[in-house]
Image (cartoon, rainbow, N blue to C red):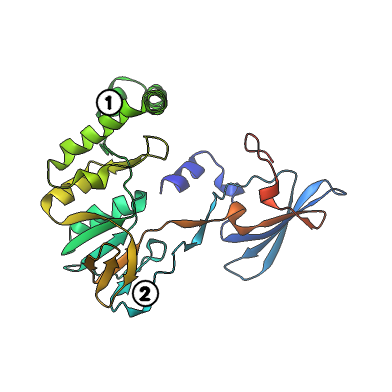
Amino acid sequence: NYVAETAREHDVERHIRYGLAVKSADWSSADKCWKLTALNETTGETEHYTASFMVGCTGYYNYDQGYKPDFPGESDFRGQIVHPQHWPEDLDYTSKKVVVIGSGATAITLVPTMAEKAAHVTMLQRSPTYLMPLPSTDKVTLALQKVLPEKAAYRLTRARNISISRFLYQRSRKSPQFMRKLFLGIIKRQVQGKADMRHFTPDYNPWDQRLCVVKDGDLFQAIKSGKAAIATDHIERFTETGIRLKSGEELAADIIIPATGLEIQMLGGIKPTVDGQEVVMKDKVIYKNVM
């Protein structure tokens, strides 16, 4: 485990308290410190901590529960509905028809992986996303590591990756039509006429929303093999055997996976207070990560 190994390497693991769920955090002006209450999930006991500073490194999603819209007719569906956030270890999709709802990173990752065993996988999206195939192995980085010290190779690789990202973003802002043609041209070469380009052509400019990376172009490989497909439409309702779209088309499915993202949740669900008064996060301004 990379995280655990890094913690041990830098001798910080002794400062980590595992299995604690922080339930409340109150700033005391009188004592000039944070007072935190945490639940020990192993023993069930409540523990108390004090700190001069509290840093929220919890992300901004609720990882305990994924976001899932209420789809009309959902109870009529006779197959399985599985949210990626609650993936059962024993899920068997071998030779099954699967529909993955969504077009974000989760869907892009799931579709080619499931297509290896499933009878067929359809990615159902309301609208297309800009996709960018990238190799999972960076040959330039591997070459640098052979001729340079580890830290020097890391710094050069990091600087290179940041520069490429900045260039693509800035170029997309300055010349959106040029970059649109560039991105769509890359995808067109990937699918090689095996899919309708309307499924890959967004109605917005590059970087108006985030680009989605396709590892090793595996999604395009799955589509070209006939094991996967993309449908761009809106859901009318679930049926006993799949999903009926507003266009009238019906997607047959044994398993439906709503890859519809996560719910926003700040500070891991902790509701901070100052001298007992709740802090309403949406009313605060965060500047350079400090509130």
Residue 167, above or below 206: above
Which is more toward the observer, 268 or 179?
Answer: 179
**Residue 248 in the image: x percent, y percent?**
24, 66
Tell me the amino acid under the disc marked 2.
Answer: Glu
Quarter of the figure with residue 43: bottom right
Crowding around mark 1 (Cα neighbors within 10 Å: few <14, some 14 to 19, many 20+) is few
Distance from the alpha carbon under mark 2 to that under mark 1? 48 Å
Quarter of the figure with residue 254: bottom left
- Circle number at residue 74: 2
- The residue under the point 15% across, 64% down is 119
User: Residue 190, can we see it?
Assistant: yes
User: Residue 138, can we see it?
Assistant: no
The kind of secondary structure element at disc 2 is helix
The kind of secondary structure element at disc 1 is helix
**Residue 132 in the image: x percent, y percent?**
29, 38
- The residue under the point 22% across, 38% down is 187
Which residue is identified by label 1?
140
**Residue 24 in the image: x percent, y percent?**
70, 59
Which is more toward the observer, 99 or 238?
Answer: 238
Tell me the amino acid under the disc marked 1.
Answer: Val
Quadrant placement of the C terminus:
top right
- Circle number at residue 269: none
Residue 3, above or below 65: above
- Toward the right, the furthest residue is 30
- The residue under the point 30% across, 71% down is 90
